[in-house]
């Protein structure tokens, strides 16, 4: 099935310009979390009440933590000359940050 001219132009705009399939910048997509989503995550972690301003700080802190852990996992993969992050790499990276899953 042939694509229409409009579909081809839309595809050209999205490819290679730091945009995801929906056309939202990837950097913005990381930090956008609704207040309800942050509160649900807090409830799951055992937080009974949450200050509203904490909901604005949480996504930034979460992104920083994930970046740090993923950076360490990538170092483990590069050290073993691998191409794929596996469970062992993530386990070691989390243990390095004091969040060991398996003791």
Image: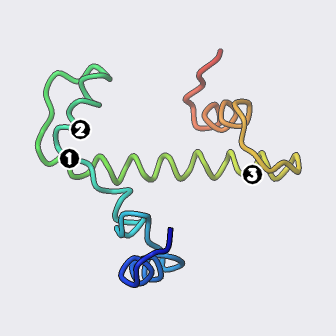
Element at label 3: helix
Closest to the camera, between mark 3 and mark 2, is 2
Say if mark 3 contacts mark 2, CB within 8 Å: no
Element at label 1: loop
18 relative position to 41: left or right: right
Query: Gap between marks 3 and 1, in whole Å?
Result: 32 Å
State the image coordinates of residue 51 (x, y, percent, origin top left): 12, 39
State the image coordinates of residue 73 (x, y, percent, origin top left): 68, 45
103 relative position to 83: left or right: left
Q: How many marks?
A: 3
Say if mark 1 contacts mark 2, CB within 8 Å: yes
Residue for badge 3: 75
Question: Residue placed at 46% from the left, 75% from the top?
Answer: 3
Residue ranking furthest to the top: 103
Query: Gap between marks 3 and 2, in whole Å?
Result: 31 Å
Q: Residue 25's quadrant in the figure?
A: bottom left
Residue for badge 1: 34
Element at label 2: helix
Sort mark 3 into few (<14), some (14-19) or many (20+) by Cα contacts within 10 Å: some
| Residue 22, placed above or below residue 54 | below
| Residue 53, placed above or below residue 21 | above
């Amino acid at each position: 099935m042939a694509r229409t001219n409009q579909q081809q132009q839309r595809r050209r705009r999205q490819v290679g310009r730091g945009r995801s399939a929906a056309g939202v910048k990837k950097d913005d997509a990381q930090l956008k979390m609704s207040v309800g989503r942050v509160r649900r995550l807090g409830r799951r972690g055992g937080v009974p009440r949450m200050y509203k301003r904490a909901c604005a700080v949480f996504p930034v802190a979460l992104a920083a933590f994930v970046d740090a852990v993923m950076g360490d996992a990538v170092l483990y993969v590069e050290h073993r000359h691998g191409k794929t992050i596996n469970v062992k790499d993530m386990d070691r990276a989390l243990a390095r940050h004091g969040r060991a899953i398996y003791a």
